[in-house]
Image: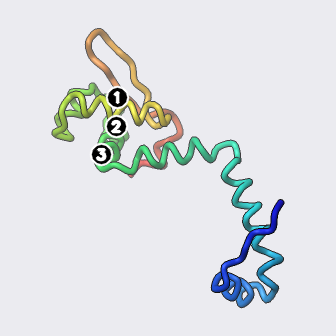
Amino acid sequence: MAAAKVDVALGRRLERLTGEDADCCVPEYAALGDTMLRSKGFDAALRRIKSLADEHRLLAVSLLKRRGELCACEIQAVTSLSHATVSHHMGILVESGVVEGRRRGKWMYYRLTKGVESLIP
């Protein structure tokens, strides 16, 4: 691995913190970061977290946590969004693995996937 160029101010802070020359630990930290970014669950966790970073989606999943399974029209009533916008937001949540949906005739029902309740307020 090529040696990472150390920013001067960063180098000083790291040297004060570790008591060692920053050139010795920056490559180690860079390698650790690379390993974490490539780790098995990192992308999935990032998608889940990003999917919850919208107030309407977070409101919808909070509602699902309290009510169990809901029809898209019930989510629409709470969020005051159009049907198309609710569908778009719920699609993002389904794709990220936070929510699962099932169709019953013309109606679409959503519920939280198992294990994500702890992420939801």
Does 78 appear above or below 101? below
Q: Secondary structure at mark 1?
A: loop
Instruction: Identify the residue shown where x is 83% and y is 60%.
Output: 1
What amino acid type is highlighted by mark number 1?
Answer: Glu
Decide which of 19, 64 is in the foreground and name it: 19
Q: Quadrant for residue 43, please give it.
A: top right
Decide which of 63, 99 is in the foreground and name it: 99
Q: Secondary structure at mark 2?
A: helix
Circle 1 residue: 69
Q: Residue furthest top?
A: 105
Mark positioned earlier in the residue sequence (1 or 3):
3
Please provide percent x and percent y for residue 9: 63, 85
Please provide percent x and percent y for residue 119: 47, 49
Instruction: Identify the residue shown where x is 27% and y is 25%.
Output: 71
* Number of other residues with Cα within 10 Å of mark 1, as a class: few under 14, some 14 to 19, many 20 or more: some
Circle 2 residue: 64
Circle 3 residue: 59
Instruction: Identify the residue shown where x is 69% and y is 42%.
Output: 40
Does 38 appear above or below 115? below
Q: Is residue 113 left or right of residue 7?
A: left
Q: How far apart in space, not on screen, are marks 2 and 1 (Cα)?
A: 6 Å
What amino acid type is highlighted by mark number 3?
Answer: Leu
Cβ atoms at labels 1 and 3 below 8 Å apart: no
Mark drawn on residue 105: none
Q: Quadrant for residue 88, please give it.
A: top left
What amino acid type is highlighted by mark number 2?
Answer: Leu
Mark positioned earlier in the residue sequence (2 or 3):
3
Q: Quadrant for residue 101, please give it.
A: top left
* Number of other residues with Cα within 10 Å of mark 2, as a class: few under 14, some 14 to 19, many 20 or more: many
Q: Is residue 32 left or right of residue 115?
A: right
Q: Secondary structure at mark 3?
A: helix
Instruction: Identify the residue shown where x is 48% and y is 49%.
Output: 49
